[in-house]
Amino acid sequence: MDNILLDNDIIDRAIKHYGERQRINQTIEELGELIVALSKSIRGFANKPHIAEEIADVEIMLHSIKRMLDLDFFVDMEIHHKLERLTEKMKRGEI
Ligand SMILES: [Mg+2]
């Protein structure tokens, strides 16, 4: 389920305004920023407000990609299957 704050109208306007290629580049950039923030937290430099900011950036951009490629339904299906598999793995005691 998507975050109700992710306003489709604003996201669609941004896709139209900046273009799909730029939105993909922005997504890659935001993913990189989240990787850096999480990596710093493992090394003992956890900055929760900063991690929250980077997660928000990534969620906005992933939602944009789903809108651009019309993937909402397929992503939801994948999430459902993957969480079912994860549940089974944990029940079996797998790592
Ligand atoms: Mg960012």
Image: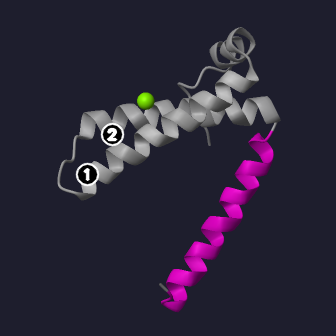
Query: Where does the magenta region start and end?
Result: 71-94
Q: How is the image coloured?
A: one colour
Q: Residue at x 58, y 28 (%)?
A: 26
Q: Amino acid at mark 2?
A: Ile
Rendered-image quadrant of the N terminus: top right
Q: Residue at x 60, y 81 (%)?
A: 88
Q: Residue at x 61, y 66 (%)?
A: 83
Q: Is residue 58 above or below residue 94?
A: above
The picture places residue 66, in percent across and down from the top left corner, at: 72, 36
Label 2 near label 1: C-beta < 8 Å? yes
Mark 2 = which residue? 51
Q: Residue at x 29, y 34 (%)?
A: 50
- Front residue of 66 and 86: 66
- Front residue of 84 and 60: 60
The picture places residue 22, in percent across and down from the top left corner, at: 67, 22
When asked about the image quadrant of residue 42, the answer is bottom left
Mark 1 = which residue? 41
Q: Amino acid at mark 1?
A: Ser
Report whether residue 15 is seen: yes
Q: Residues within 10 Å of mark 2 (few under 14, many from 20)?
A: some
State yes or no: Cβ of the residue under disc 1 lies below 8 Å from any atom of ligand 1.
Answer: no
In the image: residue 21, left or right of residue 33? right
Q: Is residue 51 above or below residue 10?
A: below
* 1 or 2: tag closer to the N-terminus: 1
